[in-house]
Image (tube, helix red, strand yellow):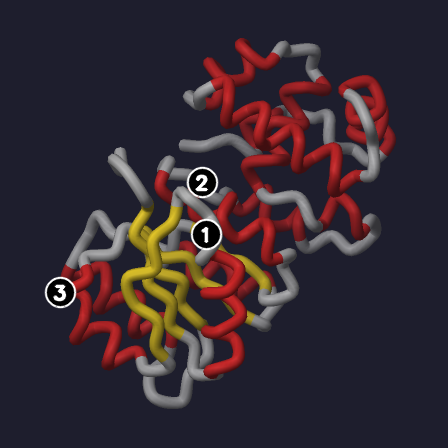
Amino acid sequence: MVVGKVRVAVVDDHELVVTAICAALEDDDEVEIVAATTSPNRLLALLAQTAPDVVLLDLAMPEMDGIACLDLLLERDPHLKVVILSGVEETRAVQQALRSGAAAFVRKTVDPRDIVAVIRQAVEDTVVSQSSLMLIDDEDDERAAVLTPSELAVLTLLARGLMNKQIAVELTLAQQTVKFHLTNVYRKLGVSNRTEAIRFAYEHGLAGEAKAYAYT
């Protein structure tokens, strides 16, 4: 459990991407940017000095492959949470990153407002299951596709009739975190209340067994 601000490091070979991510994070009271670089080797050199809790790591970099960098990061600090941020959208690439120990895989098309949520989920030891990955990659419904695995977990339990307190117990989350996820679910799905969210879940096949999208 992280006490105080979450210390975040950002590495991407494109300076513009690094700048954009930092701009999205710098105004959040829960996050402190401790390193921002275009060089994975520079990040590795700064790791002990900056002691990040979470690293946002590009997958495809000319200096060093993202998976190779991920391996080195976790070798030096097994408790570090690494979130892969990439333009690659192939399921195979996602699964490879997760098998290598990434806490999450996020597309670069993600809404900047959602990056903090992903960081929080990584710190809370969220594990993205292969089932949820397949659902995220399903482009039959673009609104459902933008839900994070954590939001999918909350939505499926909501559709089963659980209240916020019960969802919090089921997913081992604080009730405030459940409320946070629900707020994002309503915004992303374009609904205004629980009833509409539940109807959406049933109409789009998201009301199945919630364990497929939950934390492990």
Disc 1 to disc 2: CB gap under 8 Å: yes
Secondary structure of the residue carrying tag 2 is: helix
**Sequence-earlier tag: 3 or 1:** 3
Of circles 3 and 2, which is in front?
3
- Look at 54% across and 27% down and name the residue there: 211
Q: Which mark is residue 16?
A: none
Q: Position of residue 202 (x, y in %)?
A: 82, 26
The residues bearing labels 3 and 1 have C-alpha atoms spaced at a distance of 24 Å
Which quadrant: the C terminus? Answer: top left
Provide the residue designation for mark 3: 49
Amino acid carrying mark 2 in the image: Gln
Provide the residue designation for mark 2: 121
Which quadrant: the N terminus? Answer: top left
The image shows residue 182, relative to residue 92, as above or below, that is above
Q: Nearer the viewer, residue 202 or 108?
A: 108
- Look at 73% across and 25% down and name the residue there: 207
Secondary structure of the residue carrying tag 3 is: helix
Amino acid carrying mark 1 in the image: Ala
The residues bearing labels 1 and 2 have C-alpha atoms spaced at a distance of 9 Å
The image shows residue 36, relative to residue 133, as above or below, that is below
